[in-house]
Amino acid sequence: MALKLAQSCALEYQSIDRDVRWLPGWQVRNREEQRLLLQEFVERDRWVMDGSGASTFDIRVPRAELIIWLRVPRFVAILGVAKRVVKNYGTVRVAIAEGCPEPFPDREFLSYIWNFERKSAPEFVKQIDRFGPNVPVTVLRSRREFDLLIPGT
Protein backbone atom coordinates (compact mmCIF):
# COMPACT_ATOMS: atom_id res chain seq x y z
CA MET A 1 0.00 0.00 0.00
CA ALA A 2 2.87 2.39 0.71
CA LEU A 3 4.20 1.84 -2.78
CA LYS A 4 0.77 2.59 -4.26
CA LEU A 5 0.54 5.73 -2.14
CA ALA A 6 3.99 6.88 -3.24
CA GLN A 7 3.17 6.29 -6.89
CA SER A 8 -0.19 8.06 -6.70
CA CYS A 9 1.39 11.12 -5.05
CA ALA A 10 4.64 11.08 -7.07
CA LEU A 11 6.73 10.56 -3.93
CA GLU A 12 9.91 8.58 -3.39
CA TYR A 13 9.21 5.12 -1.96
CA GLN A 14 11.43 3.64 0.72
CA SER A 15 10.94 0.19 2.24
CA ILE A 16 12.60 -0.45 5.57
CA ASP A 17 12.74 -4.17 4.81
CA ARG A 18 14.27 -3.65 1.36
CA ASP A 19 16.41 -0.56 1.81
CA VAL A 20 17.43 -0.65 5.47
CA ARG A 21 17.02 -3.87 7.45
CA TRP A 22 17.79 -6.86 5.22
CA LEU A 23 20.83 -7.90 3.25
CA PRO A 24 20.80 -10.85 0.80
CA GLY A 25 20.12 -14.20 2.43
CA TRP A 26 17.95 -12.65 5.12
CA GLN A 27 21.00 -11.30 6.94
CA VAL A 28 20.24 -8.34 9.19
CA ARG A 29 22.27 -5.20 8.49
CA ASN A 30 24.00 -3.88 11.61
CA ARG A 31 22.04 -1.39 13.70
CA GLU A 32 24.37 1.58 13.22
CA GLU A 33 24.27 1.25 9.46
CA GLN A 34 20.47 0.93 9.54
CA ARG A 35 20.19 4.15 11.51
CA LEU A 36 22.55 5.99 9.14
CA LEU A 37 20.54 4.86 6.11
CA LEU A 38 17.28 5.94 7.74
CA GLN A 39 18.78 9.32 8.58
CA GLU A 40 19.74 9.79 4.92
CA PHE A 41 16.26 8.80 3.73
CA VAL A 42 14.33 11.09 6.07
CA GLU A 43 16.48 14.10 5.18
CA ARG A 44 14.97 13.99 1.70
CA ASP A 45 12.01 16.24 1.04
CA ARG A 46 9.27 14.01 -0.36
CA TRP A 47 8.96 10.36 0.61
CA VAL A 48 6.75 7.53 1.73
CA MET A 49 8.34 4.97 4.02
CA ASP A 50 6.95 1.48 4.42
CA GLY A 51 7.63 -0.38 7.64
CA SER A 52 7.17 -0.47 11.34
CA GLY A 53 9.56 -0.75 14.22
CA ALA A 54 9.27 1.67 17.10
CA SER A 55 13.04 1.51 17.70
CA THR A 56 13.60 3.95 14.81
CA PHE A 57 10.66 6.27 15.42
CA ASP A 58 13.13 8.80 16.88
CA ILE A 59 14.55 9.22 13.37
CA ARG A 60 11.43 8.85 11.24
CA VAL A 61 8.53 10.39 13.14
CA PRO A 62 9.93 13.93 13.63
CA ARG A 63 10.39 14.25 9.83
CA ALA A 64 6.98 12.79 8.94
CA GLU A 65 4.09 14.96 7.86
CA LEU A 66 1.57 12.16 8.28
CA ILE A 67 1.57 8.64 9.68
CA ILE A 68 -0.80 6.17 8.06
CA TRP A 69 -1.16 3.16 10.33
CA LEU A 70 -2.79 0.09 8.86
CA ARG A 71 -4.17 -1.44 12.05
CA VAL A 72 -6.23 -4.43 10.99
CA PRO A 73 -7.59 -7.22 13.20
CA ARG A 74 -5.16 -10.07 13.78
CA PHE A 75 -7.16 -12.52 11.65
CA VAL A 76 -6.99 -10.09 8.72
CA ALA A 77 -3.23 -9.66 9.22
CA ILE A 78 -2.62 -13.42 9.39
CA LEU A 79 -4.78 -13.96 6.30
CA GLY A 80 -2.78 -11.24 4.51
CA VAL A 81 0.48 -13.03 5.32
CA ALA A 82 -0.97 -16.32 4.06
CA LYS A 83 -2.05 -14.68 0.79
CA ARG A 84 1.37 -13.06 0.42
CA VAL A 85 3.11 -16.43 0.87
CA VAL A 86 0.82 -18.17 -1.62
CA LYS A 87 1.43 -15.43 -4.18
CA ASN A 88 5.15 -14.88 -3.61
CA TYR A 89 6.70 -17.97 -2.03
CA GLY A 90 10.26 -18.41 -3.28
CA THR A 91 10.34 -15.07 -5.12
CA VAL A 92 11.60 -11.66 -4.02
CA ARG A 93 8.86 -9.08 -3.47
CA VAL A 94 9.37 -5.42 -4.42
CA ALA A 95 9.44 -4.38 -0.74
CA ILE A 96 12.16 -6.88 0.23
CA ALA A 97 15.90 -6.84 -0.38
CA GLU A 98 17.39 -8.76 -3.28
CA GLY A 99 18.38 -12.28 -2.28
CA CYS A 100 15.53 -12.59 0.23
CA PRO A 101 12.90 -14.88 -1.30
CA GLU A 102 9.52 -15.05 0.42
CA PRO A 103 9.65 -17.76 3.11
CA PHE A 104 6.99 -19.53 5.08
CA PRO A 105 6.44 -17.39 8.18
CA ASP A 106 8.05 -18.70 11.33
CA ARG A 107 6.42 -18.97 14.74
CA GLU A 108 8.11 -15.77 15.98
CA PHE A 109 6.67 -13.67 13.14
CA LEU A 110 3.19 -15.16 13.50
CA SER A 111 3.35 -14.57 17.26
CA TYR A 112 4.33 -10.94 16.65
CA ILE A 113 1.26 -10.46 14.45
CA TRP A 114 -1.06 -12.34 16.80
CA ASN A 115 0.07 -10.36 19.86
CA PHE A 116 0.65 -7.01 18.16
CA GLU A 117 -2.23 -5.09 19.73
CA ARG A 118 -1.35 -6.21 23.24
CA LYS A 119 2.45 -6.09 23.07
CA SER A 120 3.55 -3.70 20.32
CA ALA A 121 0.77 -1.21 19.63
CA PRO A 122 1.07 0.52 23.04
CA GLU A 123 4.80 1.10 22.39
CA PHE A 124 4.01 2.48 18.92
CA VAL A 125 1.54 4.95 20.43
CA LYS A 126 4.03 5.94 23.15
CA GLN A 127 6.84 6.54 20.65
CA ILE A 128 4.64 8.44 18.20
CA ASP A 129 3.48 10.67 21.05
CA ARG A 130 7.07 11.15 22.20
CA PHE A 131 8.70 11.92 18.86
CA GLY A 132 5.80 13.37 16.87
CA PRO A 133 3.21 14.87 19.18
CA ASN A 134 2.00 17.13 16.37
CA VAL A 135 2.25 14.59 13.53
CA PRO A 136 -1.24 13.53 12.47
CA VAL A 137 -1.95 9.79 12.57
CA THR A 138 -4.54 8.25 10.27
CA VAL A 139 -5.55 4.78 11.38
CA LEU A 140 -6.94 2.52 8.67
CA ARG A 141 -8.81 -0.58 9.81
CA SER A 142 -9.01 -2.27 6.40
CA ARG A 143 -7.57 -2.30 2.91
CA ARG A 144 -10.92 -0.97 1.76
CA GLU A 145 -10.36 2.17 3.85
CA PHE A 146 -7.03 2.61 2.07
CA ASP A 147 -8.77 2.32 -1.29
CA LEU A 148 -11.22 5.03 -0.17
CA LEU A 149 -8.37 7.24 1.01
CA ILE A 150 -6.38 6.85 -2.20
CA PRO A 151 -8.89 6.31 -5.04
CA GLY A 152 -7.71 4.40 -8.08
CA THR A 153 -5.01 2.40 -6.30
Image (cartoon, grey):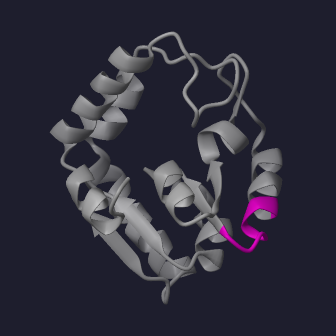
**Residue 18 on image: x %, y %:** 65, 37
Left or right of residue 142: residue 9: right
Say if residue 27 shows up in the picture.
yes
| Identity of the residue furthest to the top in this view | 90
Q: Is residue 116 left or right of residue 4?
A: left
> Does the rendering let one see residue 106?
no
Residue occupying image coordinates x 61% and y 46%? 15
Vertical arrangement, residue 124 with respect to residue 107, above or below: below
Residue at 31% from the left image edge and 67% from the top image edge? 149
Please tell me which residue lies in front, 29 or 148: 148
Task: Give the image location of residue 22, x and y in percent.
Answer: 68, 32
Look at 67% across and 30% down and name the residue there.
97
Quarter of image, res 76: top left
> Against 98, is 142 above or below?
below
Whether the magenta-drawn stretch holds residue 82 is answered as no
Give the magenta-colored segment's residue range: 40-46
Q: Which image quarter: residue 140?
A: bottom left
Give the residue displayed 57% in from the left and 37% down from the top. 95
Q: Looking at the picture, does residue 132 appear above or below residue 142? A: below
- In the rendering, at what x and y percent does residue 94 appear? 58, 33
> Residue 9: x and y, percent?
54, 66
Residue ranking furthest to the front = 152
The answer to whether 6 is drawn above or below residue 78 in the figure is below
- The mark tally for this picture is 0
Depth check, front residue: 45 or 20:
45
